[in-house]
Image (tube, rainbow, N blue to C red):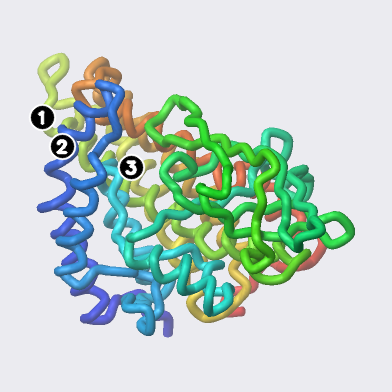
Amino acid sequence: MVDFSLSDEERQIRDTVRSFIAKEVMPLEDEVLRNERAGRPGLAPDVIKELQRKARKAGFWGINTPEEYGGLDAGAVMSAILAIETGRTFVPFAFGGSADNILYAGTEEQKRRYLIPTIEGERRSCFAITEPGAGSDARNITTRAVKDASGDWVVNGEKTFITNGNEADFVMVFAVVPDAGVTCFLVDRDMGWKSEPIPTMGEWGPASLVFDDVRVPHDNVLGEVGKGFELAMQWIRNGRFMIPARAIGSAERLLQMAIDYANLRKSMGHLIGEYQAIQWQIADSQVEIEATKWLTLYAAWRVQNGLDARHASSIAKLNGAEMAGRVVDRVLQIHGGMGYTKELPIERWYRELRLLRIYEGTDEIQRRTIARNLLKGHVRLGGIGE
């Protein structure tokens, strides 16, 4: 028998997070919109820190972080469920106490200098593999690291579209070591790399990073020389299912806005919810959201149970990214002219959700991955329970 129910503990955690988002985070949405329209960050750092302090007091700290480091170690399925809840708002908030998964591959000294301070919120990291000429094809990166006579590494190159690149004080940068291969380096900002913000159509604020003869001690190699590509893929694959999870939360919130509006707005003497054109848009949205939900939770279940989740995560990510775009487009259409204005957050969500089809693997890359797995026999149809 397949059991789709949550345990009492899981349901309590979900409901507590849902209440926290509704009471503490959603009320800040108007402030976020005002700030963004004025060209300022959505929330000031001290406001975000206060939210994280309240969340930590409520017991939500380090959702994925192992208990030995003070986290909940909630597991992939619960993490996806909580991402759905945080996705219900566009406020730029995330529970604190987490660090990039590949930092756990560091030495004890690296954990002391980078992992633990990041978990505690004392340091901020960013992950830098994408380059102007190497986006989806990460194997073609050109950033180079060469060892000099002193034993230090000298890094030269440029990275682009790096999330948190303007705020981070250290970067996990991937560079090619001649005759060895892609290697990951932990590079503090004060070692000399520079960042510049990249304006985008949404509120995501990525950066370009420039490394010009940046000297990095050998002790700052994360993992092994030449083994960086495996770390990069571990980072990407581990959290890919979280993207459609957040999309589910956003889409459900948007759909509820459409339902509420359809039950209030009148046209030609009738509530617009009485018209088939509106009903079908609402029905299609619900069907697509539910499909994404189960694809996403299945991918998370595979991660949690130590199974290969790459194929399932690609399916969930592709489906979720496209679903979110269709739902927000329908919701804007249902709201008519008001949906297109900045009085409502729909147009803001429209711009934000468009990004899902690009970052951490474009739609085209997900389709390529899914098709290749099938054509080469890496996965087979009808593999339920495997």
> Gap between marks 1 and 2, in whole Å?
7 Å
Q: Is residue 145 above or below residue 200?
A: below
Residue at the (63%, 73%) spot, across then down: 308
- Amino acid type at mark 1: Leu
> Gap between marks 3 and 2, in whole Å?
14 Å
The picture places residue 293, in percent across and down from the top left corner, at: 40, 58
- Amino acid type at mark 3: Ala
Quarter of the image with the C terminus is: bottom right
Residue at the (33%, 44%) spot, across then down: 251
Residue bearing mark 3? 283
Q: Secondary structure at mark 3?
A: helix
The picture places residue 381, in percent across and down from the top left corner, at: 68, 66
| Camera-side residue of 289 and 102 | 102
Residue 326 at least partly seen: no
Res 264 label: 1
Q: Secondary structure at mark 1?
A: loop
Residue at the (79%, 57%) spot, across then down: 147
| Camera-side residue of 346 and 103 | 103
Q: Are marks 1 and 2 in contact (CB under 8 Å)?
A: yes
Residue at the (45%, 48%) spot, across then down: 168
Res 260 label: 2
